[in-house]
Amino acid sequence: MSKVLVAVDGPVRTVTLNRPDKRNALDDEVLAGLIEAFPRQPGADERVAVLRANGPAFCSGMDLTQRKESLGKPTSIEDSLRAVEGFPLPVVAVVHGHAIAGGNELALHCDFVVASTAANFGMSLAQIGLAPTWFLAKKLIEVAGPVAAREILLLGDPLPATRMHELGIIARVAAPDELEAEAGRLIDRLAANAPLSMQIMKQTLVRQMAFWHEQPHADINARVAEVSGSADAREGITARLERRPAAFRGV
């Protein structure tokens, strides 16, 4: 069974993360599946894409077992997130469960996030000795602003969906039993709009927000790689996998 399912029903493309036994952790197969699921050219009848997930969690982030084996090396998550963000039509993330680290980024690279009040969002990288690349950090600045981005990144604690909505980071929240109805209303509304209008509007928004990426940042990503290859990163990931507190030493 594929770890990323794709179904197109009339105007709606539905992409479903399908690794419930691993809380939809992002391994290489899932990341490659996301790129294929969000092509640069949608079908002529498509108007909107929906990103969902099977199982209790939306996405727990990068697969830590796989990540531990590649510390200090670039991950492929950026290409997957670019595919989601660059999909020509609006993308709605329906977040029924927790979206952490890479899962948080995946949701925020969609155009709309509709979340259950039972869901939490967060970037726990500081708690396991890792750091986001320039590309990942700039998305938080774009959608959260500098104050909330500091809270999300430097503390690393998860925030409830209601708090994310209060901060203006996600579009809508709903009680768990009302999530599908709330998401359905938004999806139907988008599907009724003119596709060419939505495509150029999305292209305009994505390009205007991309100016942050033009700032020099090679030194930042070099430091991120250095941090990711540190003893602290190995200890942090090992501690998380072993479900114990990490003992960081700053090396």
Image: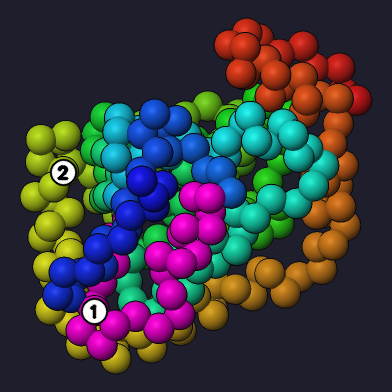
Can the viewer see residue 146 in this picture? no
Is residue 43 part of the magenta span, yes or no? yes
Left or right relative to 14: residue 223: right
Q: Quadrant location of residue 42? A: bottom left
Residue corresponding to mark 1: 46
Left or right relative to 208: residue 137: right
Name the residue type under label 1.
Answer: Glu
Q: How many marks?
A: 2
Q: Which residue is drawn at the image coordinates 90% and 25% (left, top)?
A: 251
Circle 2 residues within 10 Å: few <14, some 14–19, many ≥20: some
Q: Which residue is drawn at the image coordinates 30% and 30% (left, top)?
A: 56
Which element is circle 1 on?
Answer: loop
Name the residue type under label 2.
Answer: Leu
The location of residue 250, given as percent across then percent down, is 87, 23
Magenta part of the protein: which range?
29-51
Q: Nearer the viewer, residue 208 or 4?
A: 4
Residue corresponding to mark 2: 179
Q: Which residue is drawn at the image coordinates 57% and 39% (left, top)?
A: 62
Is residue 110 part of the magenta span, yes or no? no
Q: Which residue is drawn at the image coordinates 54% and 79% (left, top)?
A: 208
